[in-house]
Image (cartoon, rainbow, N blue to C red):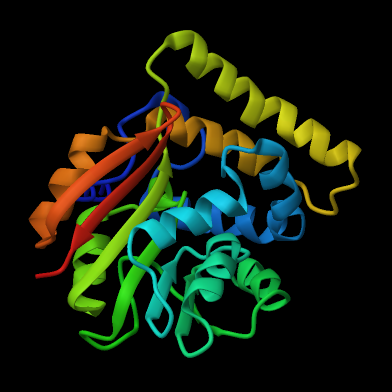
Amino acid sequence: MAESQPRNTALKADPRMQTYFASEEERRALTQTMFNEAAGGYDKAESLTALGSGSWYRRDVLRRNGVKPGMTLLDVAAGTGLVAVEAQRLIAPNGRLLALDPSPGMLVELAKKLTVETIEAFAEAIPLPDNHVDFVSMGYALRHVDDIDLAFSEYLRVLRPGGRVCIMEISRPKSRFAQQMMRFHIGGVVPFLARLTGSLADVKKLWAYYSDTINASIDPETIMTALRRAGFEDVECSVSLGIFREYLGRKP
């Protein structure tokens, strides 16, 4: 019997995705394997991509959207800690940082940078109590969430009243030419340069997957509608350079 479809996946139906997986079970297994294998070389590949926009941008996004000293912050899909490092700088010295990711390999790399609480789990099932954190961040990983309704409901649940969510994401460029250039850069140039510069991990497959998920990602309005449906207020989306988006919401 065919597996039931998720209520609101972060990816549109796209033939390219069918080359990677045929079910949610396969997707989770595949992405966990890719992230584990690429963990050691992930930061180098990300810096070569430059589409993560740099530590200065991540820190500025968090600061502009209300991250302050003393906060308890949950970074979802923390990966190797690129967002978490900047969050820690902003909430120090008395804040508390929780880093959640389903990839143990990524969390191992994160632990080399930060001494923080790590949680191996998916965004759709966060093992934290209700009303537990002041801020939820997510950096460039929404495309890897199978059910954004469940994930956003979890974000709302763990946030304290008045707490905010900030989701950073790369969106698909409007022009076909720009889409092709981004695909070539992420899926071809970056893996090639990563190998030339001595990356210890094979990032080629993961970066090709990144490129395909950007092109298959759902529209911004669909994401904002899902945030409102989950119960968030003051939902908005800002965009920089045509591709960097910040999705924001506040828990009543």
| Quarter of image, res 122 | bottom left
- Give the number of callouts: 0
Residue 112 location in percent, x, y?
73, 76
The residue drawn where x is 33% and y is 58% is 166
**Residue 95, above or below 189:** below
Residue located at (46% from left, 57% from top): 28
Coordinates of residue 209 in the picture (x, y in percent): 56, 38
Q: Residue at x 35, y 46 (%)?
A: 246
Residue 18 appears anywhere in the view: no
Residue 175 visible in image: yes
Residue 57's spot in the image, x, y percent? Answer: 53, 49
In this picture, residue 153 sits left or right of residue 140: left
Q: Which is more toward the observer, 72 or 77? A: 72
Which residue occupies 40% across, 76% down?
73
Answer above or below: position of 16 versus 130: above
Figure quadrant of the C terminus: bottom left
